[in-house]
Image (tube, helix red, strand yellow):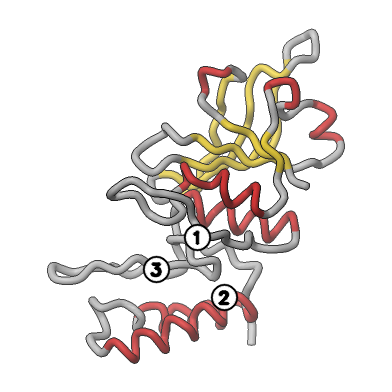
Amino acid sequence: MSTFNKIKVANFFARQSCAAWQPIRIIRVICRHIYRYIMEHGAKEYPYANPKFAKWQESDSNFYTLITDSSNFVIRRSTSYVAWMMKKYCGSSPKLPKPGPRKPGEHRFDAKHWGEILEYNGWQKVSKADWPSYQDILDERHFIGVMPDADEFGLLVWFNNARFTVTGFPAIWLVSTYKDFKEQCLKIPVSEKSGIIWYREP
C-alpha cells in the first residue's frame, strides 16, 4: 500500500477518534491506537503537520478534540513539526520524560517546556559562544530553538541556515516552524533579544 493510501486510512481512524464524530468512547480509543500505529510504522516519514492529514473539522459545538501525532504532540503545531524534523533528520522521534511542575492551564509538553525533552534526549543547551555558526552548517549539525515567550505556549524552530556579515559572523538565522496552522520559514536577527534558547543535537 502506498504512503498516500496509508494516510487515507489513517485519516479515517483519526476522525473516528474524535468525540465530535464518534460518540462511543471505546471505539475512539481503539481508532486512536490504530491511526497512531499507522503513523509510527506504516507512514512514519509523513509530515503530520501537513494539512492533508486530519483536514476535516476537529470540533463541533459540544466537543473539542485535538488530533495528536505518533509522539502525542498536537498536529499542526510547532511541537509536532519539530518532532517530525527530529525523526526525519536525526533518526528518531523524541522520547518523553516525566514532566516537571506546571502552572495552572499549562500542558505537559507545550513548546516552552521543550528544554526538558531535548535534554532528556541528549541535546545540549548552548551558550552564546556556541550559537549556530557557519561551521555548523558545513558539518550539517542540527539545532532546535525554544522560544518560551513567543506566545502563550511558546514556539519551537528548526535551524536551517544563516546569513552572514562581511566579517563572517551570522546576522540572521533562517529557521522553519509551524505557526498559524501552516509551515513557515522565518528570519530571526541574531541577538539575545530574539529570546531563542538553542539546543544542539548530541
Mark 2 vs mark 3, CA separation in Å: 12 Å
Mark 3 vs mark 1, CA separation in Å: 12 Å
Residue 152 lies, in percent from the top left, at: 34, 40
Callout 2 amino acid: Met
Question: For the residue labelled by badge 3, is the local secondary structure a helix, a strand or a loop?
Answer: loop
Q: Earlier in the sequence, mark 3 or mark 1?
A: 1
Name the residue furthest top: 167
Callout 1 amino acid: Asn
Q: In the rendered image, which quarter is residue 168 located in?
A: top right
Callout 3 amino acid: Ile
Residue 50 lies, in percent from the top left, at: 50, 60
Question: For the residue labelled by badge 2, is the local secondary structure a helix, a strand or a loop?
Answer: helix
Query: How dense is the environment of label 2, judged by Cα within 10 Å: few (below 14), some, or many (20 and up)?
Result: many
Relative to 107, 116 lies left or right: right
Residue 55 lies, in percent from the top left, at: 38, 67
Query: How dense is the environment of label 3, judged by Cα within 10 Å: few (below 14), some, or many (20 and up)?
Result: some
Instruction: Classify the position of the N terminus by image quarter.
Output: bottom right
The residue shown at (63%, 59%) is 94
Tag 1 residue = 50
Tag 2 residue = 39
Q: Earlier in the sequence, mark 2 or mark 3?
A: 2
Above/below status of 124 relative to 89: above
Mark 2 and mark 3 residues within 8 Å of each other at the beta carbon: no
Q: Earlier in the sequence, mark 1 or mark 2?
A: 2
Tag 3 residue = 67
